[in-house]
């Protein structure tokens, strides 16, 4: 058994979305880097994992993501897509009884969502997760509504800052250092069931109730409206929903 401390970097650029069924699920936060540190039971580092991911769903990296992480669209073009990186990641983990350790739950959630979006299996992953963020925040008497950011926690725990943040491997390294500092017997993994957590509610498709729309106009004008008026109302309503006629006040 081992501890897998991991971190992810994501991209979302709606204007360049492709090859994705928007009706099936919301637009994804696509993983573009996976970084991990493997610790044995004595907290010795026995391996690291660092892979960038060629995007499948977005054709470009959002400029904000590039500014934050330094990752560019051009940089990822020569990388392998998520299914290949995920396969390599599961080989790195090697043991299904390992314990995942993260800073916050968003990384495990988005990892499972990316697995689902690529129609892959999560059976190779551990179901046990330690979320360090609330434990460390509680140590500094902070409420669950005021959880520490990773960099702030590193500073408060006097961990040397040797690498920039917002890089998956380097953030995993800092999380591992935090884990070594704060771990005690009260910190226990929680069971995270992928088959339940990755299920997404299906959004019922909504359409205009034309009959009620026309009834409302007839009520307003206290008369039957003509077929020509009906077509004009339906067209105007549909055009209004495109927001192309909005203006600033």
Image: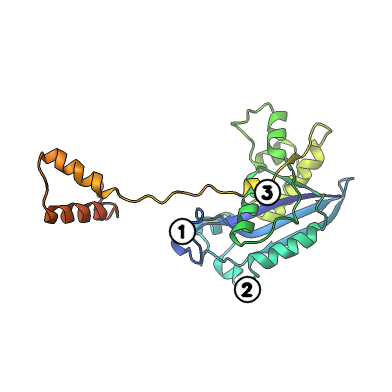
> Residue drawn 52% across and 57% down?
12
Nearest the viewer among 240 and 73 is 240
Q: Position of residue 99 (x, y in %)?
A: 79, 47
Q: Is 159 rendered above or below residue 114?
A: above
Do the numbered discs 2 and 1 sit on residues whose CB atoms are within 8 Å?
A: no
Q: Which residue is mark 3?
A: 194
Of the numbered discs 2 and 1, the one sitting upstream in the chain is: 1
What's the distance in space between the residues labelled 1 and 3, CA to CA?
Answer: 26 Å
Q: Is residue 3 above or below residue 30?
A: above
Residue 44, compared with residue 94, is above or below; it is above
Q: Residues within 10 Å of mark 3 (few under 14, many from 20)?
A: some
Mark 1 neighbour density, 10 Å: few (under 14) some (14–19) many (20 or more): some
Residue 226 lies left or right of residue 55; in this view the side is left
User: In the rendered image, which residue does mark 2 sit on?
Assistant: 78
What residue sits right under mark 1 in the picture?
14
Q: First in sequence, mark 1 or 3: give its number.
A: 1
Viewer-proximal residue, 223 or 237? 223
Q: How many marks?
A: 3
Seen at 63% across and 73% down, the residue is: 78
> From what the image shows, is residue 120 above or below residue 219?
below
Q: Which mark is residue 103?
A: none
Q: Are marks 1 and 3 in contact (CB under 8 Å)?
A: no
Q: Under tag 2, what secondary structure?
A: loop
Residue 189 in the image: state x and y as whole percent: 77, 39
Whole-Å distance between the Cαs marked 2 and 1?
A: 22 Å
The answer to which of marks 2 and 3 sits earlier in the sequence is 2
Which residue of the protein is positioned furthest toward the top in this rendering?
141
* Location of residue 126 in the rendering, given as x and y in whole percent from the top left corner: 76, 50
Q: CA distance from mark 2 to mark 3?
A: 31 Å
In this view, the residue farthest toward the bottom is 78
């Amino acid at each position: 058994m081992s501890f897998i401390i991991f971190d992810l970097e994501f991209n979302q650029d709606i204007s360049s979305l492709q090859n994705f069924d928007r009706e099936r699920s919301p637009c994804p936060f696509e993983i573009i880097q996976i970084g991990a540190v493997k610790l044995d039971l004595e907290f010795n580092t026995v391996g690291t994992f660092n892979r960038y991911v060629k995007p499948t769903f977005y054709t470009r990296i959002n400029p904000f993501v590039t500014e934050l992480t330094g990752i560019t669209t051009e940089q990822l073009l020569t990388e392998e897509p998520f299914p290949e990186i995920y396969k390599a990641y599961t080989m790195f983990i090697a043991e299904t009884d390992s314990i995942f350790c993260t800073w916050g739950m968003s990384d495990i959630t988005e990892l499972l969502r990316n697995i689902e979006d690529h129609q892959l299996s999560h059976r190779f992953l551990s179901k046990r997760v330690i979320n360090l963020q609330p434990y460390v925040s509680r140590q500094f008497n902070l409420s669950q509504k005021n959880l520490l950011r990773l960099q702030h926690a590193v500073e408060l725990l006097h961990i040397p800052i040797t690498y920039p943040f917002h890089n998956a491997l380097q953030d995993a390294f800092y999380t591992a250092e935090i884990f070594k500092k704060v771990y005690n017997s009260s910190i226990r993994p929680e069971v995270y069931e992928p088959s339940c957590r990755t299920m997404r509610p299906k959004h019922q498709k909504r359409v205009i109730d034309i009959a009620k729309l026309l009834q409302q106009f007839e009520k307003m004008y206290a008369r039957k409206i003509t077929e020509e008026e009906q077509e004009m109302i339906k067209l105007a309503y549909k055009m209004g929903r495109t927001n192309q006629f909005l203006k600033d006040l």
